[in-house]
Amino acid sequence: MSKYERTIIGDFNEILSFCEASILKKSVSASLTDETNFESNGIRVAIRVFERYSLFGKDLVSLCVSLIGESDKLLLTAISSGAWTDSFLEKFMETFEIQYPNQ
């Protein structure tokens, strides 16, 4: 299991859409398997679970992405699990860091 966590300033919807699109574009076998959303008193939470088949490990790997925010202050967490998880998370991290460099 590997984890990527980062606080950022930005638009919740824009960053959530970017995360979903970038994960699905990076792997032909990636799919969004489940999601949930919550909002209360200005706090928003979005959780997305993705899976893909690892040809190298011949196993399913998953990536759980959580975005939590109040106004434009956001916390992004991505946690991978399963065999050969690092490349799934690493590809997401690289793409995200290019689009949203450290502020």
Image: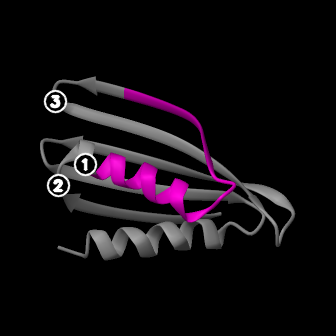
Looking at the image, is mark 3 or mark 2 earlier in the sequence?
A: 2
- How crowded pointer 1 is (Cα within 10 Å; few <14, some 14-19, many 20+) is rated as few
Q: Residue at the right extreme?
A: 58
Q: Which mark is residue 10?
A: 2
Q: State which quadrant residue 7 falls in.
A: bottom left
Write down the region rendered in magenta: 15-37
User: Label 1's element?
Assistant: helix
Identified at 24% across, 75% down, the residue is 102
Q: Is residue 53 left or right of residue 17?
A: right
Q: CA distance from mark 3 to mark 1?
A: 17 Å
Depth check, mark 2 against mark 1: the one in front is: 1
Answer whether residue 21 is magenta in the image: yes
- How crowded pointer 3 is (Cα within 10 Å; few <14, some 14-19, many 20+) is rated as few
The amino acid type found where label 1 is placed reads: Glu
Depth check, mark 3 against mark 2: the one in front is: 2
Q: Position of residue 53 (x, y in %)?
A: 76, 57
User: Label 3's element?
Assistant: loop
